[in-house]
Structures are given as structure tokens and as C-alpha cells.
Amino acid sequence: MKLLVTGGAGFIGSNFVHHVVEHTDHRVTVLDALTYAGNRASLAGLPADRVAFVHGDITDAALVDGLFAETDAVVHYAAESHNDNSLDDPRPFLETNIVGTYTLLEAARRRDVRFHHISTDEVYGDLELDDPARFTETTPYNPSSPYSSTKAGSDLLVRAWVRSFGVQVTISNCSNNYGPYQHVEKFIPRQITNIIRGIRPRLYGAGQNVRDWIHADDHSSAVLTILEKGRIGETYLIGADGERNNKHVVELILSLMGQDPDAYDHVADRAGHDLRYAIDSSKLRTELGWEPQFADFEAGLAATIDWYRENESWWAPAKDATEAFYARKGQ
Ligand code: NAD
Ligand code: TDX
């Protein structure tokens, strides 16, 4: 099969491309605009006869149409992905997440190409800390931030294109990913690289907010499973039962790196900060037989710390600008 992977030079997209090369015979073309979040080095070492790279924008209809004409299936990861950036300047989130997804859907319609849309659990808003409920495929949409509202908008466009035009689409909404190749703006890599640089980790507010962590490789295996066995028009939630509050995670990172677990600073909270995300992934597990492989969060985190220690040349170029951005916001 020939796959087109949008956003394949980003964090989760590049993990997916590595996963596909390792576990299947598919050939992959990556379409990526190489924004500040894209990095060709994340695809280094992959065989040239299996992975091709196209530098371009998903809002470029002519480019997209030509690529769809040569592909069997599309997996759509490209997005503006960081909540803090969306609070600073929402415009690129509308362009890429809404107009970009629209552009791809129109090409999928014209070319009758199988399309898998990657989304987030943040479209459902947040849960109370003491609420026993978790998100399911029928939870009403209630996004909080410019980022999550544009992802929700893109999901709704996808659903409309299935119903109105019969486009061959599946959707997945995944919880927070961790693993190699994640940009240093995000919570876990920011704290790991701070510690490597001798800067104290930064916790927003009291740190009680809960995220449901999944290793990026488990996200990739779930997406491949949906691509192969998912029912057209359906949504699948992806999660690995990894709920932890941020305070716990920062203390764990400090301990795993041989530091005093209290050696972090509380900083200004994020505006509109979602309290808790939690995923019920029973539909994916029972209907399609998927199971996560990284059951031990502490072991996965330790391996991720090793990766950042061994790959400073990958993340160092982005570190100073990222910390300057946070310093301006008092975070
Ligand atoms: P990322 O920011 O690391 O990567 C995004 C990639 O998309 C980059 O390579 C960037 O260059 C590319 N891109 C951005 N705008 C583009 C455009 N207009 N045209 C072409 N390429 C463009 O993001 P990520 O964390 O890897 O997230 C990937 C997808 O997974 C997103 O759709 C995100 O909403 C979703 N998601 C992320 C998480 C998470 O924990 N990070 C969880 C659930 C879902
Ligand atoms: O320095 C920090 N300190 C801190 O306490 C940073 C960068 C974050 N945080 C908190 C905010 C969140 O509660 O950590 C938590 C995780 O923050 P992010 O890594 O920014 O992720 P989040 O906002 O939860 O969104 C992520 O998961 C869902 C991805 O960035 C999204 O793309 C995905 O859809």
C-alpha cells in the first residue's frame, strides 16, 4: 500500500512513519510544511526506497490533489498542536487545522481515497478530578482552547464529508502522547531538557491537572489497526489507562534523573487550563482487538529521558527560543 502521511516530520507523525517502516511493507510519502514543529532529522536513517519527503502545505489544493492521485490511503497528522501557542496567536490554528483539513477532504472526495483523521481527546473538554467518568465516542464536544476548538471543527468537517459525500473516512481521538521526537515546548520534554540544562522544571498552577499518558508507539499501532480494520465513518478513542497528575509526573522525572523530587517551580497557570482528560478505549480494544504495549509508564518515561540525553543535537536548536517564549508569558 502507498500511504500519504501529513505532518510526518512532527512528533507523532514521525513516530508513525518509523512504526510503519518497521512493522509493514507499506511505502510512505510524507507531506510536511516544516513549520517550527517539523524536523526532517526525525526521519533520518529511514530507507529512501520506503519513505519519500514532500515539502509543502496541506492548504495547497493543487499539490494535495496531485499527491492524492498517487496514494492508496492518507493519514492526516498535520496540525498546529500546542495549546499555549494557540492562546498567543490562534490564526495559524484556523488555517492549518480547519482550512487544511477541508483542503484534504476535498481531495479525498475527488480522488476517492481512504482517509484517516488524527484528532485529540481535548475536543471533549475536561472532566472533574473526582468524576468516575471517562470520555467515550458519544461524549458531547465541548472544547476549551483555540487549539482544541479548531481540532473539534476539523472533526466535524470530517463527519460532514462522510455523511454528505460518502468519503471513506475514519477518525481517532487520542490522549496525551509521550516518547522520542516530541518538541521541547511540550510538558514532558520541556522538563527533561530543563533538567539536562540545569534549569528547574516549571509546573503550571498547583499541578493537580490530570493527563492520560500514552506512548507514541502505542498511538501508531492503534492507528494502523484502525486503518486496516476500522469501520468507515466510525470514530475510535485511543488511550492506555495512563492517568497521572502533572505534579506526580514532574516529581517522577526529577527522581528518574537523580534529582531532588521537589526541585521544581510553580509558575503562572495556563488560561482556561483543562482539569482532567481520561479515555475509555473499550471500543477499539473489543471491536478491533488493539492493546497497548507500553503498560509501564515509568519504564516508558525512563526510556524517553535516555532518548533526550542521547539526542541533544536534535532538540538543542529549539530550546532557547522555546524558553524565551515561556519567559515572556511568566511560565
Ligand atoms: P507536532 O506539532 O509535533 O507536529 C505537527 C507537524 O505538522 C509538524 O511537522 C509541522 O511541520 C506539520 N504542519 C503544521 N502545519 C502544516 C501545514 N499547514 N501543512 C503541512 N504540514 C504542517 O504535533 P504532534 O504532537 O505530532 O500532533 C500530531 C497530530 O496528533 C495533531 O493532529 C494533533 O492534534 C494530534 N494529537 C496530538 C496529541 C499529543 O499528545 N501531542 C494527542 C492527540 C492527538
Ligand atoms: O511547562 C509546562 N508546565 C506544565 O505544567 C507545560 C509546557 C505544560 N504544563 C502542563 C499543562 C498540561 O496540563 O502539563 C500538561 C501537558 O501540557 P502540554 O504538553 O502542553 O499538553 P496538553 O495541553 O495537555 O495537550 C497535548 O495533549 C493533547 C498536546 O499538546 C495536544 O496536541 C494534544 O491534542
Image (spheres, grey):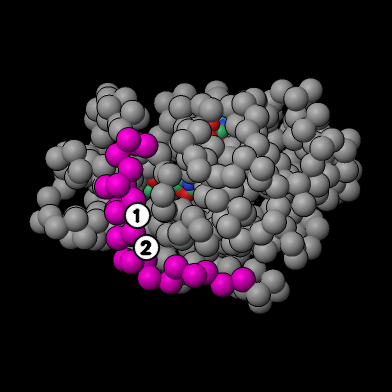
Whether residue 207 is visible, yes or no, is yes
Q: Position of residue 116 (x, y in %)?
A: 71, 49
How far across and how far down the image is residue 72, in percent? 80, 47
Q: For marks 1 and 2, give the CA distance.
A: 6 Å
What is the number of the mark on residue 218?
Answer: none
Q: Which residue is mark 1?
A: 304
- For disc 2, the marked residue is 300
Label 2 amino acid? Gly
Q: Residue at x 29, y 54 (%)?
A: 306
Within 10 Å of disc 1 (Cα), the crowding (few <14, some 14-19, many 20+) is: many
- The reply to whether the magenta stretch includes residue 275 is no
Q: Secondary structure at mark 1?
A: helix
Residue 153 visible in the shown view:
no
Q: Which residues are magenta?
A: 290-315
Report if residue 294 lies within the magenta region.
Answer: yes
Asked if the residues shown at circle 1 and circle 2 are in contact, with their CB atoms under 8 angstroms apart, the answer is yes
Q: Quadrant of residue 223?
A: bottom right
